[in-house]
Amino acid sequence: MNKHAVAVLGASGYSGSELLRYVAAHPALELVWATADTNAGKPVSELFGHLGDFGDVVLQPTDIDAVPEIEVAFLALPHGSAATHGRTLVGKGVKVVDLSADWRLRDAAAYPEWYGAPHPHPDELGTWAYGLTELNRDAVAAAEGVANPGCYPTAALLALQPLVADDVVAKDGIVVSAVSGVSGAGRKIDAAYLYTELEGSFGAYRVGKHQHTPEISQELGVDNLTFTAHLAPMTRGLLATCYGRAVASAEDIRSSLERAYKGEPFVTVLPSGKQPQTKHVSGTNRAIVALEVDARTNTAIVTCAIDNLGKGAAGQAVQNANLMLGLDETTGLTGLGIFP
Amino acid sequence: MNKHAVAVLGASGYSGSELLRYVAAHPALELVWATADTNAGKPVSELFGHLGDFGDVVLQPTDIDAVPEIEVAFLALPHGSAATHGRTLVGKGVKVVDLSADWRLRDAAAYPEWYGAPHPHPDELGTWAYGLTELNRDAVAAAEGVANPGCYPTAALLALQPLVADDVVAKDGIVVSAVSGVSGAGRKIDAAYLYTELEGSFGAYRVGKHQHTPEISQELGVDNLTFTAHLAPMTRGLLATCYGRAVASAEDIRSSLERAYKGEPFVTVLPSGKQPQTKHVSGTNRAIVALEVDARTNTAIVTCAIDNLGKGAAGQAVQNANLMLGLDETTGLTGLGIFP
Amino acid sequence: MNKHAVAVLGASGYSGSELLRYVAAHPALELVWATADTNAGKPVSELFGHLGDFGDVVLQPTDIDAVPEIEVAFLALPHGSAATHGRTLVGKGVKVVDLSADWRLRDAAAYPEWYGAPHPHPDELGTWAYGLTELNRDAVAAAEGVANPGCYPTAALLALQPLVADDVVAKDGIVVSAVSGVSGAGRKIDAAYLYTELEGSFGAYRVGKHQHTPEISQELGVDNLTFTAHLAPMTRGLLATCYGRAVASAEDIRSSLERAYKGEPFVTVLPSGKQPQTKHVSGTNRAIVALEVDARTNTAIVTCAIDNLGKGAAGQAVQNANLMLGLDETTGLTGLGIFP
Amino acid sequence: MNKHAVAVLGASGYSGSELLRYVAAHPALELVWATADTNAGKPVSELFGHLGDFGDVVLQPTDIDAVPEIEVAFLALPHGSAATHGRTLVGKGVKVVDLSADWRLRDAAAYPEWYGAPHPHPDELGTWAYGLTELNRDAVAAAEGVANPGCYPTAALLALQPLVADDVVAKDGIVVSAVSGVSGAGRKIDAAYLYTELEGSFGAYRVGKHQHTPEISQELGVDNLTFTAHLAPMTRGLLATCYGRAVASAEDIRSSLERAYKGEPFVTVLPSGKQPQTKHVSGTNRAIVALEVDARTNTAIVTCAIDNLGKGAAGQAVQNANLMLGLDETTGLTGLGIFP
């Protein structure tokens, strides 16, 4: 197969290494450049023991002027620097999938409020496609720059967006209570992320302040959504448990959800009475969604399980790149998960 | 110290073994009888390797006619049989702390609806004290029979009850999204609870149907509470994340919470900006509560961390027994948690 | 690609489901039959949530008369029944890879001693090829029946066999102290394998009696090997730490090891000073070997990390099937591991 | 009870916080000083959430001139600085239990070889008692300075020392293959100890170079012992699996072991056929020892499970302090473990 040259910028973190893993398994992509900052100059094998032949790839400094000829760039860079590098690469004709938050929000005021720093190009916000593939397929396929969604927004939006769009769940009073594995925090060297501190422990964090709140709100088109993030003692996996007021019958709510994902290769809707386990999607680009309508309280409870590094990051990034390149959307993404 | 003779009925499960552990550490309690059903005749050491000298205790059949002279009985029996045994023991003048759900609900119609079987003595429902100690201290101290709260209700009520009672959080639309470690499921020998199936996995269960829902609703005095339980890959620990509509200022809500637990030896209220980790209460009878009021959505988000086997079961049972015996409430419960 | 029809007998355990996963990823194999005993009649999705489209496969009873036309059968059956079924299938012209222990030992007396039951066809022991691929490649390629090695023997033999064969490590006094993740115990529904019992715990088991002892001894050609197995609180992964008396220089011992695995696609020998982590081979057919020669005590310490379900079971089974079918040995086995 | 004033120097690591926990539970000890270096000035609660009232203790700089009047000092300081501080405190008439390695080795040449730096007072090596309590009780009781054993040596020596002393196991060719939980590495902020890197992984480390090797050898009186340390994905717990050539009958070896620990409050010898689980001693000062003599290979296989922070560090330190103060050796150490 004719291969498309790709680069992974920021390959020394967990999203970056997962991108390398997906690219390695992809029959139509070929890695030609991988970068890092503090780890530039090291072979990948010094950072990661699981990447086989890719271990010989030497990480380059993230110097955009030195970028080789590529068709697609995946950006797993820190917020802030991604915006500028992404814009430059698009300007050079490269298709860019940005895994940072830099091009997700459309409201220029929201970015500094939630990310604590001004956006470097605020007037260009809203010009990239929001890459929740199933819900925005045409825009992604046509885009030069795709803002890959955050992990929590991916799960929350897959659970809620069809129901809000179909007006079967009310727009006000939505609550998203979500839980991530520790890899969601990245490869951050901090006492709080030591094995000994997190093993056997569960807690909420950044309550009322999590930066994924405006992203979920924006895509749902609601303005008073409550979102709480929690960390669970596991490496991968993310579950969003979403609560919304039912404004249609249980049957209509279920129909809305099933219609939204009928034929979708990566989204499974479970029958009533079943709930997803995060481990069942571990290592994959899959999402599993379940719905119960609590007749007693008139509440739709929608859960969605993903792998935070898969559909929540690198998997969806490759899915988007496939669309941008005109490939079958599932190319390189059909590997089964690992269980147990 | 003069010791009070106690019995643990149902000592072969995790609540039962935790009761043995607390009794062993208690300067004023002395174990004189421990029972089990399928494991009757075995020394405790065959079931549990951690109980030291208590390992020599031989488990007796749960035959109420054979009960020796005791002052207090802890019942860690299955729902249904606990009701009858507890009633009989109270009739014999024994103070009973029942860790099952049998005497928690006051509404005779609710028990069969949520527990799937008729209550053996429905007309006596409501005659036992509900043993959430901090919120019902006088009734517990005066009671002959105490219904020890469920693990989820303990955390949810500690988080919400003062706020609802003070009318600073609205009674309608409350959502409780809670997470337990696996020991909450007991020592159930089932494929779903194998190490290999649960390690690295997170999921919701019994959505819309969990039997702790009416218990929380009853004690809060609300009727449309939404409650979802989840299992996290850890052995102990429980966190309830509770969402309620703020109907007072953030300051008033915080005052209500701090007033409720001022001077309480087992409940800590964290300052704004801090969140509890379940591991910080592991092995103890402590609860840690945190509050944030999300001004954007006008929502009080209250979290409460407990050890599901401690404040959520055996610890609170001993706390209640202390009150019933006229002992200092903290006797035998001051051991620090184990960390890391 | 022209596909070879394969069957997986015993697909409801962890080796079986891992075989399904590897077959799904294999471009030249096509699953046409999957069997189970107590779970016959169920779709795979009722047992496993991670197998995507394979979830629709309905498990058939393990009735050898009903076997469809197949080229290769993978047997993940209990010891004892595998021997008879495997022999029958070979008689029908099917190539068989048996993951049970039934055809591994050549000594008819050893089987009942270590497996506690007579072998059904003791006079035919020794007629199947022992499938430690790297060390027995030609015999595997020519065989109709391959005895796939045990998980512990795979790691111990990869570590030790070249050194013993080259006489650089003495044959007497070898000690193998090895550790497996819990999936090595299979999907056994027993209190000992509950999450709550194993999480945070480590211990040895079957000390002096483990049935893999004669298998390792046979293939090394030694008769007083000491082997101890341990269970670690993790799902996958196996590390064998092997101790042997050095009877050559450290350089010669290292040369022996490196020569043995030069060019091997699935075995990596680390430089001195580095040690493998089991997680680096998780989900793969890879093995990582490390060697230190302790000059102070004249001891070669060789470690080998594998995935007990990969190179220790299903991965190596597919590697052997590839050879038997004349395919490139790495076909379908090149997927990278999952990390973190 | 009249209380003895104690200090914990180095209270911000895991051994230090475990010392605080044991002191809090001790009826005859009273904490009057707790120190730290980089964390000086912080209340303990900022570092540890589990220490209840002790959370208000403010950590002081480790300035020996500022030491208040104390009877006992526990040193949980880095190797090197402990030697000097310990010596100074003994000079002031304080009884010192040093959890570092500084006073363990008697051979002045061994310290720099294994610890990579010269000992500050090499001529005084050998003047402190080696505090493996059960095997050195009289010396500990009489000592002003006690070198608390390393975690691996504690388990290995409890397993082997009686057998070597009784000449029922040969002195040459002993192999100790041991495994620790991650807290054994301390609260070191390093990428290698992140949750994501260690969860689900197992590996050996410092093979042939671990600094506990000379300590075990010294106390056993052997000179060619092979020791390998491994890290398992659990927070606490340590198992040493020890292999020695049997030079007496299996009965005599068992008698030697049982005689050694008859009546010992903290050491349990299991009957043949049983093996310890580290979780059964979690949170305690207990050790569980098991023995099998493999008749086939003439090898004694002795396992010993401890909590690396309990009998392997803080628990044994308190046991030693009890002896030094003339208290009952078990004071403050009788709490049961936590399980599950």
Image: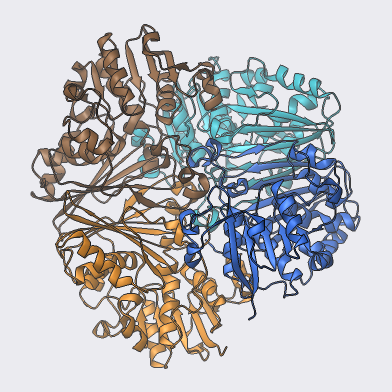
Chain colours: A cyan, B blue, C brown, D orange
Residue D178 at x, y percent in the picture: 32, 57
Residue B305 at x, y percent in the picture: 68, 56
Instruction: Residue at the far front: name it.
Output: B65
In the picture, measured across the screen, residue B245 lies left or right of residue C164, that is right
User: Compared with residue A123, is residue C199 higher up or lower down, i.e. above or below?
Assistant: below
Residue C242 at x, y percent in the picture: 23, 47
Asked whether D171 or A324 is in front, the reply is D171
User: Compared with residue A97, is residue B210 higher up or lower down, i.e. above or below?
Assistant: below
Asked whether B329 or B176 is in front, the reply is B329
Q: Is residue D102 visible?
A: yes
Q: Is residue B148 visible?
A: no
In the picture, measured across the screen, residue B183 lies left or right of residue B152, that is left
User: Compared with residue D244, is residue D162 higher up or lower down, i.e. above or below?
Assistant: below
**Which residue is located at x 37 percent, y 73 percent?**
D264
Query: Which image quarter holds the N terminus of chain B?
Result: bottom right
Residue D319 at x, y percent in the picture: 43, 77
**Which residue is located at x 21 percent, y 18 percent?**
C141
In the picture, measured across the screen, residue A21 lies left or right of residue B22, that is left
User: Compared with residue D126, is residue B249 higher up or lower down, i.e. above or below?
Assistant: above
